[in-house]
Amino acid sequence: MSGRADGLGWLLAAAGIAGLATAVAVRPADAAHAAAQDWPPFVLVAGLLLIGLVADGDGLFAAAGARLARLAPTGAVLFAGAVVLVSAVTATLNLDTSVAFLTPVLVHTARARQTGEPALLYGCLLLSNAASLLLPGSNLTNLIVLGHLHLTGGQFAARMWLPWLGAVAVTAVVVALGERRSLARAVADLEPAPQPVLGVGLVAIVVATVLVIAVRSAALPVFAVGLVAAGARLTFGLRQRHRHRQEAAATEAARLRPGQVWQVLGVPVLAGLFGAAVALGTLGRAWSGPEHLLAHLSGWSTAAFSAAASVVVNNLPAASLLAARAPTSPFPLLIGLNLGPNLCVTGSLAWLLWLRSARAAGARPSLTRASLLGLVAVPLSIVVALAALTVTG
C-alpha cells in the first residue's frame, strides 16, 4: 500500500509540475502572481507539519489521547473529548497535522477503551476539515483567499469563530449519531497514561500559534520555527546514537530521522498540489469567467459552488482559481472550500493523510462510509456556518 501511495504521489507531482511549466510558458506574468499568492500557505503548512512531528516525538498527542481515555467514563464522553482535541489541534497546527498525528492516537485510544473506534476514526477526518475555519493557518485555503484581505489572524478569528463553532458542533452531532452504536459499548480500564516531554515541541506550538494570530504573513516565521524544532530534534537523535543503548532505547520515540521528515511533509504531493494551484491561479487571472460567476452569486450560492469545486479539483487548486481575483464574498467562499471536502476523498489533502495514518494504525476506514457521513454533515454545517457568519458581520 505504501508503494502504491508513493506512486500516486509522484504521479500527482508530475502532473502539477507539468501544469506549472505550462502556465509559466504561456502566461509568465500571471503565473508569477499566482505563485506569489500560493507559496505562503504551502510554506506555512510545511512548518506546522514539522512542529507536529516534533510534538508527536515528545509524546504530546499520545499523552493527550491517553489522558482523555482515562477521564472518559463513557463512549459519549470519550467522543466529546476527542472533538475538543481535534478542534484544538486543527485550529493551531492545521488540519493536515491533525489527521496525520491524531488519527493513530484516537484509533489506539478507542481500542484501549474497547469503544467508539468508528466514531473517533471518521470524526478525526470530518472534524479536522470542519474545524479549519478558525485561524488563517488552520487551512491552506484560508491563506490563499486571505491574500486579498490583508487580515491578521486575530481579525480573521473575530469574523470566523462563530461559524467555526457551528460547523464543528453540527459535524460532531452527525458523526455521533451516525456511529452511536460504537459509542454505546462499555469502556474498559486503562493503564496509567504516559508522561509527555514538555520541551521543544510544546514551545514550538506556543510560538507558532502566537505568530499565526498576531502576524499577517506568518508563513516564513512559522516555517523557521519548524526547521529549528526539527533540527534540534534531529541533532538530539544523532547524539543519542553515541550513548548507552538502554538510554537510547528510552528516548527512541523522541528521535527524528530525515526519512520521517520527508514522509510527513509528503513532498511529492505538496509539490503536485502547488503546481496545480499555480496553474489554475494563472487560468483565473487570464480568464475572467470565475470572477464574473462569483460576482453574480449570493453568499449561499458561493458556498455551495465552492464546496462542489473543492470536490472536483481539490480545495487548494479550487481556492487558487476562485480567488485569483478578489472574490465578492470571500468568507462564504472559504466556508464552502473548507467544509465541502468532507463530501469526497478528492476534496482535500487531509483525506490522503488520514487514509495513510489510519491504515498504518491497523484501521480499515471505508471511504464510502466517510462520504455518507459527509453527505449529511456538509449541507447542514454550511447552512449553520453561513447563518453564524451573518451574526459576526
Image (cartoon, grey):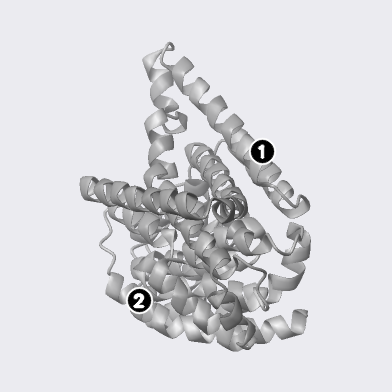
Q: Secondary structure at mark 1?
A: helix
Where is 197 relative to 241, above or below? below
* Residue that appears at 43% across and 64% down: 348
Q: Nearer the viewer, mark 1 or mark 2?
A: 2
Q: Compare residues 66 and 317 and report the one nearer the observer.
A: 317
Q: Secondary structure at mark 2?
A: helix
Q: Is residue 316 left or right of residue 33?
A: left
Q: How many marks?
A: 2
- Image quadrant of residue 177? bottom left
- x, y (%) of residue 132? 57, 64
Q: Is residue 120 left or right of residue 37?
A: left
* Residue that appears at 47% across and 54% down: 26
Q: Quadrant of the C terminus?
A: bottom right
* Residue that appears at 41% across and 15% down: 241
Where is 202 relative to 163, above or below? above
Q: Is residue 83 visible?
A: no
- x, y (%) of residue 146? 67, 62
- x, y (%) of residue 333? 60, 75
Q: Compare residues 42 and 235 and report the one nearer the observer.
A: 42
